[in-house]
């Protein structure tokens, strides 16, 4: 679980002051994040009854220059122009935060009253953190001729890594399900910008250079390499690779597009209209490959 502190407006911002014990400083369920919230009066009038609102679930720590009301909010009695008050707060990561898969954003907000009876400041919306997604498409092909083959009930696994050596996995392993199809997809969402390395893995996230499915031996093939870089204003990247079968599995079918056209003609072969309803059926064909040596 990553936590991102954000500016809410010029007079109040939160700074994350510790890191979790997970990968790249991520927080685990039950760990506590600590924030320092700096409140500054940036206008040229004295502000009274300044109230700081923290994210839901956060706990304000008692300190100097402010009190804590019954709602758990910070109240600063008076702030002259340029005054600064520092507030400490904590937030304990829950399993629900982890399960949501989203980046946790701490947004601090401040409101106060001017001694010149100016209207209360209106909170200024802050842009949400940019996130990206990578959609991975995996195909299954016959290594002999490159033709797509469809599998029934097949499962393969992919994962993202932060290093080219594929030793530092990012997040969970994704399942690619093929059920009567020659390809399947998996999508990783909520990713920050950066460079990612993609690999087919075992179910427990170990990269593989070859594998076996239902009696067929395959090798993952990455025609465009294994790296994806995402940046900019958000969006999605796509990544394609194939499992190339050196020996075909028992339940494969050739994946072909079959177009069926039916014409209605009279006894002279001329096309005529018809109000009848026709049906069509699809057949699954399996070929057996064999070799003969002399």
Image (tube, rainbow, N blue to C red):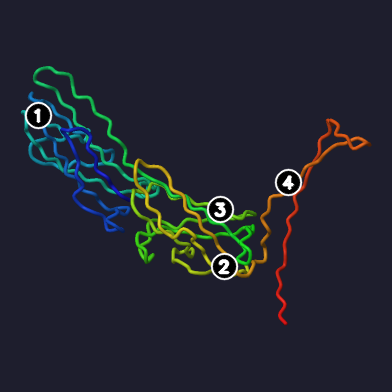
In percent of width and height, residue 155 lies at: 56, 59
Disc with the residue nearer the chain's start (1 vs 4): 1
In the picture, the disc for residue 77 is 1
Q: Secondary structure at mark 2?
A: strand
In percent of width and height, residue 272 lies at: 86, 32
Numbered disc total = 4
Mark 2 and mark 4: span between their CA atoms? 30 Å
Mark 1 and mark 2: span between their CA atoms? 70 Å
In percent of width and height, residue 216 lies at: 61, 69
Between residue 20 and residue 154, name the one nearer to us: 154
In the picture, the disc for residue 218 is 2
Does 142 appear above or below 185?
A: below
Q: Residue under circle 4?
A: 259
Q: Is residue 151 visible?
A: no
Foreground: disc 1 or disc 4: 4
Question: Image quarter for residue 160?
Answer: bottom left
Q: Residue furthest bottom?
A: 294
**Left or right position of 31 against 229:** left
């Amino acid at each position: 679980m990553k936590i991102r502190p954000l500016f809410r407006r010029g007079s109040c911002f939160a700074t994350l002051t510790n890191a979790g014990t997970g990968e790249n400083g991520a927080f685990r369920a039950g760990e506590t994040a600590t924030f320092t919230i700096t409140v500054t009066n940036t206008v040229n009038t004295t502000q009274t009854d300044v109230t700081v609102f923290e994210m839901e679930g956060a706990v304000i720590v008692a300190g100097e220059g402010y009190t804590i009301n019954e709602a758990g909010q910070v109240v600063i009695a008076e702030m002259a122009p340029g005054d600064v008050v520092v507030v400490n707060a904590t937030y304990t990561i829950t399993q629900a935060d982890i399960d949501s898969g989203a980046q946790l954003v701490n947004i601090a907000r401040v409101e106060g009253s001017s001694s010149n009876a100016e209207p209360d400041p209106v909170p200024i919306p802050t842009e949400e953190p940019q996130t990206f997604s990578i959609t991975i498409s995996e195909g299954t092909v016959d290594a002999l001729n490159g033709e797509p083959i469809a599998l029934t009930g097949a499962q393969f696994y992919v994962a993202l890594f932060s290093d080219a050596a594929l030793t530092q996995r990012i997040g969970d392993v994704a399942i690619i399900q093929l059920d009567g199809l020659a390809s399947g997809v998996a999508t990783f969402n909520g990713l920050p910008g950066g460079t990612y390395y993609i690999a087919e893995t075992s179910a427990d996230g170990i990269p593989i250079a070859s594998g076996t499915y239902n009696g067929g031996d395959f090798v993952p093939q990455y025609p465009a390499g294994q790296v994806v870089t995402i940046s900019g204003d958000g969006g999605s990247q796509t990544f394609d690779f194939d499992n190339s079968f050196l020996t075909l599995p028992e339940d494969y079918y050739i994946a072909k597009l079959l177009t069926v056209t039916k014409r209605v003609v009279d006894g002279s072969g001329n096309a005529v209209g018809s109000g009848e309803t026709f049906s069509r059926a699809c057949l699954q064909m399996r070929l057996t490959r064999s070799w003969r040596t002399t």
